[in-house]
Amino acid sequence: MKHPLLTAFTSVLLATQALAADFTLSPDWAKLPAGGPQLGNMHGDVAVSSKNETYVSVMDPAHGILVFGADGRLARALTGAPNDFHGFLIHREAAGEFIYGARLTAQTIVKLTLDGKVVLEIPASAIPDRVKMLQPEPAKGAPAPAAGTPAPGTPILRLTGMAVAPNGDLYVTDGYATSNVHRFDRTGKYLATFGGKDAPYGFKTLHKIVIDPRFTPARLLGCDRENMRLVHLSLEGDFLGVYATDLLRPSALAIHGDLAAVGELRGRVTLLDKAGKVVTTLGTNSNTDEVATNRTDPAKWRAGIFNAAHGVAFNARGDLLVSEWTLFGRMHRFDRK
Protein backbone atom coordinates (compact mmCIF):
# COMPACT_ATOMS: atom_id res chain seq x y z
CA MET A 1 0.00 0.00 0.00
CA LYS A 2 1.41 3.38 -1.00
CA HIS A 3 1.99 6.04 1.62
CA PRO A 4 -0.67 8.84 1.33
CA LEU A 5 2.00 11.54 0.98
CA LEU A 6 3.70 9.61 -1.82
CA THR A 7 0.36 9.14 -3.57
CA ALA A 8 -0.40 12.86 -3.31
CA PHE A 9 3.07 13.79 -4.57
CA THR A 10 2.74 11.41 -7.52
CA SER A 11 -0.63 12.91 -8.44
CA VAL A 12 0.78 16.44 -8.42
CA LEU A 13 3.82 15.34 -10.44
CA LEU A 14 1.69 13.64 -13.09
CA ALA A 15 -0.63 16.65 -13.32
CA THR A 16 2.37 18.96 -13.73
CA GLN A 17 3.90 16.77 -16.42
CA ALA A 18 0.59 16.68 -18.28
CA LEU A 19 0.28 20.46 -18.11
CA ALA A 20 3.84 20.92 -19.38
CA ALA A 21 2.97 18.91 -22.49
CA ASP A 22 -0.30 20.79 -23.02
CA PHE A 23 1.11 23.68 -25.08
CA THR A 24 2.08 23.32 -28.73
CA LEU A 25 3.38 26.07 -30.98
CA SER A 26 1.05 27.46 -33.64
CA PRO A 27 3.74 28.79 -36.03
CA ASP A 28 3.19 32.01 -37.98
CA TRP A 29 -0.23 32.41 -36.39
CA ALA A 30 -0.53 36.19 -36.91
CA LYS A 31 -1.14 36.82 -40.60
CA LEU A 32 -0.89 40.16 -42.36
CA PRO A 33 -2.28 41.20 -45.73
CA ALA A 34 0.04 40.78 -48.73
CA GLY A 35 2.95 43.23 -48.57
CA GLY A 36 3.09 43.36 -44.77
CA PRO A 37 5.95 41.12 -43.60
CA GLN A 38 5.93 42.41 -39.99
CA LEU A 39 3.51 44.03 -37.57
CA GLY A 40 5.65 47.14 -36.96
CA ASN A 41 7.36 48.71 -33.96
CA MET A 42 6.08 47.16 -30.71
CA HIS A 43 6.72 48.06 -27.08
CA GLY A 44 3.37 47.15 -25.65
CA ASP A 45 0.99 44.37 -24.79
CA VAL A 46 -1.59 41.84 -25.95
CA ALA A 47 -5.12 41.03 -24.76
CA VAL A 48 -7.97 38.76 -25.88
CA SER A 49 -11.69 39.63 -25.97
CA SER A 50 -14.59 37.30 -25.18
CA LYS A 51 -15.09 36.91 -28.95
CA ASN A 52 -11.60 35.38 -29.12
CA GLU A 53 -10.18 38.36 -30.98
CA THR A 54 -6.58 39.23 -30.13
CA TYR A 55 -5.68 42.90 -29.61
CA VAL A 56 -2.02 43.85 -30.05
CA SER A 57 -0.59 47.33 -29.41
CA VAL A 58 1.79 48.84 -31.96
CA MET A 59 3.61 52.16 -32.24
CA ASP A 60 2.10 53.19 -35.56
CA PRO A 61 1.03 56.87 -35.87
CA ALA A 62 -2.02 55.76 -37.86
CA HIS A 63 -3.34 53.24 -35.33
CA GLY A 64 -2.33 51.99 -31.92
CA ILE A 65 -3.94 48.54 -31.87
CA LEU A 66 -4.23 45.73 -34.40
CA VAL A 67 -7.07 43.22 -34.00
CA PHE A 68 -6.71 39.61 -35.17
CA GLY A 69 -9.49 37.08 -35.56
CA ALA A 70 -9.42 33.61 -34.06
CA ASP A 71 -7.76 32.34 -37.25
CA GLY A 72 -4.90 34.84 -36.92
CA ARG A 73 -6.01 36.99 -39.84
CA LEU A 74 -5.91 40.76 -39.38
CA ALA A 75 -9.50 41.90 -38.82
CA ARG A 76 -9.04 45.66 -38.36
CA ALA A 77 -6.89 48.43 -36.93
CA LEU A 78 -8.14 50.76 -34.20
CA THR A 79 -7.37 54.26 -35.43
CA GLY A 80 -8.73 55.77 -32.21
CA ALA A 81 -6.33 53.85 -29.98
CA PRO A 82 -3.14 55.65 -28.87
CA ASN A 83 0.15 54.37 -30.23
CA ASP A 84 2.01 54.51 -26.90
CA PHE A 85 0.17 51.84 -24.93
CA HIS A 86 2.83 50.08 -22.89
CA GLY A 87 0.48 47.96 -20.84
CA PHE A 88 -3.22 47.38 -21.49
CA LEU A 89 -5.96 44.85 -20.81
CA ILE A 90 -9.52 44.04 -21.82
CA HIS A 91 -11.92 44.11 -18.88
CA ARG A 92 -15.50 42.90 -18.84
CA GLU A 93 -18.04 44.85 -16.80
CA ALA A 94 -21.79 45.46 -16.71
CA ALA A 95 -21.73 47.81 -19.70
CA GLY A 96 -19.63 45.44 -21.83
CA GLU A 97 -15.94 44.96 -22.56
CA PHE A 98 -13.47 47.83 -22.51
CA ILE A 99 -9.78 48.42 -23.13
CA TYR A 100 -7.89 49.98 -20.23
CA GLY A 101 -4.37 51.18 -20.91
CA ALA A 102 -1.41 53.14 -19.57
CA ARG A 103 0.24 55.52 -22.05
CA LEU A 104 4.01 55.61 -21.72
CA THR A 105 4.79 58.96 -23.33
CA ALA A 106 1.51 60.84 -22.92
CA GLN A 107 1.46 60.05 -19.16
CA THR A 108 -2.30 59.41 -19.16
CA ILE A 109 -4.60 56.49 -18.43
CA VAL A 110 -7.43 55.74 -20.85
CA LYS A 111 -10.51 53.56 -21.16
CA LEU A 112 -11.67 52.71 -24.67
CA THR A 113 -14.49 50.77 -26.25
CA LEU A 114 -13.38 47.75 -28.26
CA ASP A 115 -13.65 49.85 -31.42
CA GLY A 116 -11.26 52.47 -30.04
CA LYS A 117 -13.57 55.21 -28.74
CA VAL A 118 -12.25 56.98 -25.63
CA VAL A 119 -14.80 56.92 -22.77
CA LEU A 120 -12.50 57.88 -19.87
CA GLU A 121 -9.14 59.63 -19.66
CA ILE A 122 -7.23 60.29 -16.46
CA PRO A 123 -4.62 63.03 -16.87
CA ALA A 124 -1.20 63.04 -15.25
CA SER A 125 -2.35 65.96 -13.11
CA ALA A 126 -4.72 63.60 -11.24
CA ILE A 127 -1.67 62.09 -9.53
CA PRO A 128 -0.03 64.34 -6.91
CA ASP A 129 3.37 65.72 -7.88
CA ARG A 130 4.79 64.63 -4.52
CA VAL A 131 4.68 60.97 -5.62
CA LYS A 132 6.21 61.53 -9.06
CA MET A 133 9.81 61.41 -10.19
CA LEU A 134 11.56 64.66 -11.10
CA GLN A 135 13.00 64.91 -14.59
CA PRO A 136 16.76 64.49 -14.09
CA GLU A 137 19.46 66.82 -15.31
CA PRO A 138 21.01 65.59 -18.58
CA ALA A 139 24.29 63.77 -18.18
CA LYS A 140 27.42 65.81 -18.78
CA GLY A 141 28.35 65.69 -22.43
CA ALA A 142 25.06 64.06 -23.46
CA PRO A 143 23.33 65.16 -26.70
CA ALA A 144 20.76 67.91 -26.44
CA PRO A 145 17.37 66.59 -25.19
CA ALA A 146 14.77 65.81 -27.84
CA ALA A 147 12.06 68.36 -28.52
CA GLY A 148 9.30 68.11 -25.94
CA THR A 149 11.50 66.66 -23.21
CA PRO A 150 10.39 68.06 -19.82
CA ALA A 151 12.73 70.54 -18.18
CA PRO A 152 14.96 69.22 -15.37
CA GLY A 153 13.06 69.18 -12.09
CA THR A 154 9.64 68.70 -13.74
CA PRO A 155 7.46 66.00 -12.05
CA ILE A 156 6.97 63.18 -14.56
CA LEU A 157 5.38 59.74 -14.92
CA ARG A 158 6.50 56.72 -16.96
CA LEU A 159 3.42 54.51 -16.83
CA THR A 160 3.97 50.88 -17.79
CA GLY A 161 1.19 48.59 -16.56
CA MET A 162 -2.43 48.45 -15.48
CA ALA A 163 -4.96 46.25 -13.71
CA VAL A 164 -8.68 46.53 -12.90
CA ALA A 165 -9.98 45.12 -9.60
CA PRO A 166 -13.27 43.23 -9.21
CA ASN A 167 -14.90 46.37 -7.76
CA GLY A 168 -13.73 48.49 -10.72
CA ASP A 169 -10.80 50.22 -8.99
CA LEU A 170 -7.89 50.96 -11.33
CA TYR A 171 -4.23 50.27 -10.55
CA VAL A 172 -1.43 51.75 -12.66
CA THR A 173 2.32 51.18 -12.32
CA ASP A 174 4.87 53.96 -12.79
CA GLY A 175 7.42 51.30 -13.66
CA TYR A 176 10.02 53.34 -15.54
CA ALA A 177 10.17 56.10 -12.94
CA THR A 178 9.25 55.52 -9.27
CA SER A 179 7.95 51.91 -9.33
CA ASN A 180 4.90 53.25 -7.50
CA VAL A 181 1.37 51.94 -7.97
CA HIS A 182 -1.35 54.58 -8.31
CA ARG A 183 -4.93 53.63 -7.40
CA PHE A 184 -8.15 55.20 -8.74
CA ASP A 185 -11.82 54.38 -8.43
CA ARG A 186 -13.86 53.35 -11.47
CA THR A 187 -14.66 57.00 -12.30
CA GLY A 188 -10.99 57.99 -12.39
CA LYS A 189 -10.86 59.62 -8.95
CA TYR A 190 -7.39 59.35 -7.41
CA LEU A 191 -7.36 57.28 -4.21
CA ALA A 192 -3.82 56.43 -3.15
CA THR A 193 -0.21 55.62 -4.06
CA PHE A 194 1.88 52.77 -2.68
CA GLY A 195 4.91 50.68 -3.58
CA GLY A 196 8.15 52.25 -4.75
CA LYS A 197 11.83 51.61 -4.27
CA ASP A 198 11.98 51.87 -0.47
CA ALA A 199 11.22 49.17 2.13
CA PRO A 200 9.15 47.11 2.49
CA TYR A 201 8.69 47.01 -1.29
CA GLY A 202 12.21 47.58 -2.63
CA PHE A 203 11.06 47.49 -6.25
CA LYS A 204 13.40 47.86 -9.19
CA THR A 205 11.12 48.53 -12.17
CA LEU A 206 7.64 47.33 -11.22
CA HIS A 207 6.90 46.74 -14.89
CA LYS A 208 3.37 45.31 -15.17
CA ILE A 209 0.68 44.03 -12.82
CA VAL A 210 -2.42 41.85 -12.93
CA ILE A 211 -5.24 41.02 -10.58
CA ASP A 212 -4.61 37.55 -9.16
CA PRO A 213 -8.08 36.00 -8.62
CA ARG A 214 -6.70 32.66 -7.39
CA PHE A 215 -6.75 33.94 -3.81
CA THR A 216 -9.52 35.22 -1.56
CA PRO A 217 -9.60 38.16 -1.42
CA ALA A 218 -8.11 38.87 -4.84
CA ARG A 219 -4.69 40.53 -4.84
CA LEU A 220 -2.19 42.16 -7.16
CA LEU A 221 0.64 40.20 -8.76
CA GLY A 222 3.49 42.34 -10.06
CA CYS A 223 6.61 41.97 -12.22
CA ASP A 224 9.49 43.38 -10.18
CA ARG A 225 11.64 43.13 -13.27
CA GLU A 226 15.17 44.06 -12.26
CA ASN A 227 14.84 42.11 -9.00
CA MET A 228 14.01 39.09 -11.22
CA ARG A 229 10.97 38.28 -9.12
CA LEU A 230 7.16 38.38 -8.89
CA VAL A 231 5.48 39.88 -5.86
CA HIS A 232 2.02 39.87 -4.28
CA LEU A 233 0.36 43.02 -2.96
CA SER A 234 -3.03 43.46 -1.35
CA LEU A 235 -5.52 45.70 -3.12
CA GLU A 236 -4.91 48.21 -0.31
CA GLY A 237 -1.18 48.22 -1.07
CA ASP A 238 0.25 45.94 1.61
CA PHE A 239 3.32 43.94 0.62
CA LEU A 240 2.21 40.31 0.95
CA GLY A 241 5.40 38.60 -0.15
CA VAL A 242 7.48 37.21 -2.98
CA TYR A 243 5.65 34.78 -5.26
CA ALA A 244 8.52 33.63 -7.52
CA THR A 245 12.23 34.34 -7.97
CA ASP A 246 15.12 33.67 -10.36
CA LEU A 247 13.21 34.81 -13.44
CA LEU A 248 14.77 36.35 -16.57
CA ARG A 249 13.62 39.96 -16.17
CA PRO A 250 9.87 39.27 -15.82
CA SER A 251 7.90 41.81 -17.84
CA ALA A 252 4.30 40.65 -18.28
CA LEU A 253 1.74 38.40 -16.61
CA ALA A 254 -1.46 36.53 -17.41
CA ILE A 255 -3.52 34.10 -15.32
CA HIS A 256 -5.77 31.24 -16.43
CA GLY A 257 -7.22 28.91 -13.83
CA ASP A 258 -4.43 28.07 -11.40
CA LEU A 259 -1.73 28.85 -13.96
CA ALA A 260 0.29 32.08 -14.28
CA ALA A 261 2.26 32.85 -17.44
CA VAL A 262 5.26 35.17 -17.16
CA GLY A 263 6.77 36.86 -20.22
CA GLU A 264 10.49 37.36 -19.61
CA LEU A 265 12.51 39.97 -21.45
CA ARG A 266 15.58 37.73 -21.61
CA GLY A 267 13.95 35.31 -24.01
CA ARG A 268 11.57 32.98 -22.20
CA VAL A 269 8.03 32.40 -20.96
CA THR A 270 7.61 30.57 -17.64
CA LEU A 271 4.41 28.90 -16.44
CA LEU A 272 3.88 28.78 -12.68
CA ASP A 273 1.34 27.05 -10.46
CA LYS A 274 -0.63 28.75 -7.70
CA ALA A 275 2.21 28.19 -5.23
CA GLY A 276 4.69 29.94 -7.53
CA LYS A 277 6.47 26.75 -8.57
CA VAL A 278 7.67 26.32 -12.14
CA VAL A 279 5.44 24.02 -14.19
CA THR A 280 7.28 24.43 -17.49
CA THR A 281 9.06 26.96 -19.67
CA LEU A 282 8.47 27.85 -23.32
CA GLY A 283 10.64 29.32 -26.06
CA THR A 284 13.88 29.68 -24.10
CA ASN A 285 16.51 31.56 -26.15
CA SER A 286 20.08 30.68 -25.21
CA ASN A 287 21.66 33.16 -27.64
CA THR A 288 22.43 36.06 -25.33
CA ASP A 289 23.01 38.51 -28.20
CA GLU A 290 19.38 38.02 -29.34
CA VAL A 291 17.53 38.62 -26.07
CA ALA A 292 16.38 41.71 -24.15
CA THR A 293 16.72 43.88 -27.24
CA ASN A 294 14.23 45.22 -29.75
CA ARG A 295 16.75 45.10 -32.61
CA THR A 296 17.20 41.39 -33.28
CA ASP A 297 17.04 40.98 -37.06
CA PRO A 298 14.02 38.95 -38.26
CA ALA A 299 16.48 36.83 -40.24
CA LYS A 300 17.62 35.43 -36.88
CA TRP A 301 14.13 34.62 -35.59
CA ARG A 302 13.34 30.99 -34.83
CA ALA A 303 9.81 29.65 -34.58
CA GLY A 304 8.63 29.57 -30.98
CA ILE A 305 11.87 31.03 -29.59
CA PHE A 306 11.54 34.37 -27.82
CA ASN A 307 13.81 37.38 -28.06
CA ALA A 308 12.08 39.82 -25.69
CA ALA A 309 8.69 38.65 -24.43
CA HIS A 310 6.83 41.80 -23.36
CA GLY A 311 3.11 40.92 -23.31
CA VAL A 312 1.21 37.71 -22.50
CA ALA A 313 -2.48 36.78 -22.56
CA PHE A 314 -4.68 33.70 -22.42
CA ASN A 315 -7.87 33.23 -24.39
CA ALA A 316 -10.90 31.54 -22.81
CA ARG A 317 -9.75 27.99 -23.61
CA GLY A 318 -6.24 28.58 -22.29
CA ASP A 319 -4.29 29.17 -25.51
CA LEU A 320 -1.32 31.49 -24.84
CA LEU A 321 -0.56 34.63 -26.88
CA VAL A 322 2.80 36.40 -26.51
CA SER A 323 3.89 39.75 -27.97
CA GLU A 324 7.50 40.92 -28.17
CA TRP A 325 9.42 44.15 -27.73
CA THR A 326 10.77 44.63 -31.25
CA LEU A 327 11.19 47.26 -33.91
CA PHE A 328 9.66 44.87 -36.43
CA GLY A 329 6.66 43.39 -34.65
CA ARG A 330 6.27 39.76 -33.63
CA MET A 331 3.55 37.55 -32.12
CA HIS A 332 3.59 33.96 -30.88
CA ARG A 333 0.74 31.58 -30.11
CA PHE A 334 0.89 28.32 -28.18
CA ASP A 335 -2.29 26.25 -28.34
CA ARG A 336 -3.59 24.37 -25.31
CA LYS A 337 -4.45 20.79 -26.27
Image (cartoon, rainbow, N blue to C red):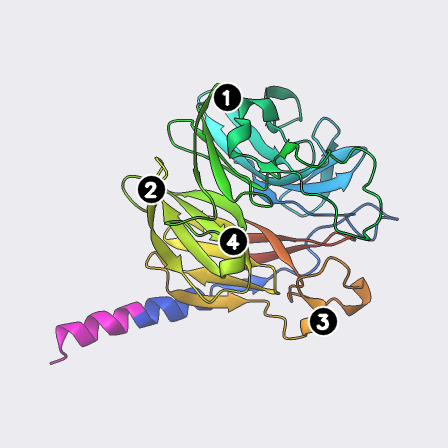
- The quarter of the image holding the N terminus is bottom left
Asked if the residues shown at circle 2 and circle 4 are in contact, with their CB atoms under 8 angstroms apart, the answer is: no
Q: Position of residue 48 (x, y in %)?
A: 56, 41
Pointer 3 local density, CA inside 10 Å: few below 14, some 14–19, many at least 20: few
Q: Earlier in the sequence, mark 4 or mark 3?
A: 4
Q: Residue at x 14, y 72 (%)?
A: 4
In the image, farthest residue toward the left: 1
Which residue corresponds to mark 2?
Answer: 238
Q: Earlier in the sequence, mark 1 or mark 2?
A: 1
CA separation, marks 1 and 3?
Answer: 42 Å
In the shown orientation, is residue 257 left or right of residue 53?
Answer: left
Q: Tell me which residue sits at (62%, 37%) in the image.
A: 134
Mark 4 or mark 1, which is nearer to you?
Answer: 4
Our reading of the magenta stretch's main secondary structure is helix
Callout 1: few (<14), some (14-19), or many (20+) C-alpha neighbours within 10 Å? Answer: some
Q: Which residue is drawn at the image coordinates 84% and 49% (left, top)?
A: 143
Mark 2 → mark 3, Cα distance in angstroms: 38 Å
Q: Which residue is mark 1?
A: 188
Residue at label 4? 204
Q: Tell me the kind of residue under disc 2.
A: Asp
Label 1: element kind: loop
Task: Say which element carries label 2.
Answer: loop
Span highlighted in magenta in the image:
1-12
Name the N-terminal-most of marks 1 and 3: 1
Q: Which element is circle 4 on? A: loop
